[in-house]
Structure formats: structure tokens, C-alpha cells
Image (cartoon, rainbow, N blue to C red):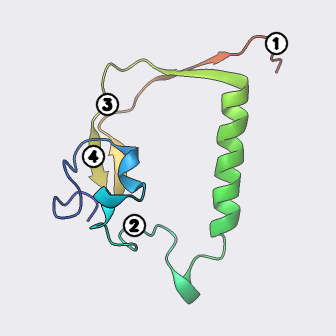
Amino acid sequence: MCRQEKYFTDPLTFDPTRWLRDENTSRVPTYLFMPFGHGVRMCIGRRFAEQQLQLLIIRMLQRFHVECEEAELRQVFSLVLLPDRNPRFVFRRRKGETA
């Protein structure tokens, strides 16, 4: 559903801002994307998983400069959006950081 033109303008383009709420996204249903379910049947580990992902990303960005060596990545749909090939990311340790 996240790739249907009836919900998004140019759905095949990577645009994280499409999830921001404003007058342009009023046609996007609230429950269009629910990876952890909703309501009484929602995954009980959702909050823990989201918190751990946020902490991991914060710690990585504090310690490394992250660059992608690929010129351009496209998306492939496989239940969720994935890159069309395995990108090679380069992690360069920030100055002053030790192991």
C-alpha cells in the first residue's frame, strides 16, 4: 500500500518527509503502515525494540562518520522496502574516539 499513487505522489521515490503530517498527507490513512500491529494485538516488544534501535543509531553516529560508496540506491519491495543491491557502507571513526 505504501507504493500506491492513490496515497502518495511519486510513490517510488525515497522521501521520508511523506510521513510528516501536513495538508499534503491528509489522504494518507493513519493505519497504512503498522510493522508492530495495533491495539490489543500489538507486539509487546514494540517499545523495547524501538528504543534499542534508537540507542544503537545514536551510538553509531556519535562514534562514526557513515558514508555509502554506492552512487545511487533504488528500492525493492519485499514486505518492507529494501535497497536493490547490498550497499557498501564505510564507517570512519570520529576523531578522539577509541574502541
Marks 1 and 3, the one that precedes in the sequence: 3
The residue lying toward the viewer, choosing from 90 and 61, is 61
* Residue at numbered disc 2: 33
The one of 69 and 2 positioned closer to us in this rendering: 2
Q: Are marks 1 and 4 in contact (CB under 8 Å)?
A: no
Instruction: State how far apart marks 1 and 3 are (Cα).
Output: 32 Å
Residue at the spot of label 1: 96
Classed neighbour count for the residue bearing mark 2: other residues with Cα under 10 Å, few (<14), some (14–19), many (≥20): few
Q: Marks 4 and 2: which is nearer the front?
A: 2
Residues at badges 3 and 4 in contact (C-beta under 8 Å)? no
Q: Can you name the residue that lies furthest to the bottom here?
A: 40
Q: Give the alpha-carbon distance from disc 3 to disc 4, as whole Å.
A: 10 Å
Q: Of marks 1 and 2, which one's residue comes earlier in the chain?
A: 2
Q: Position of residue 71 (x, y in %)?
A: 32, 19
Cα–Cα gap, marks 4 and 2: 17 Å
Numbered tag placed on residue 73 in the rendering: 3
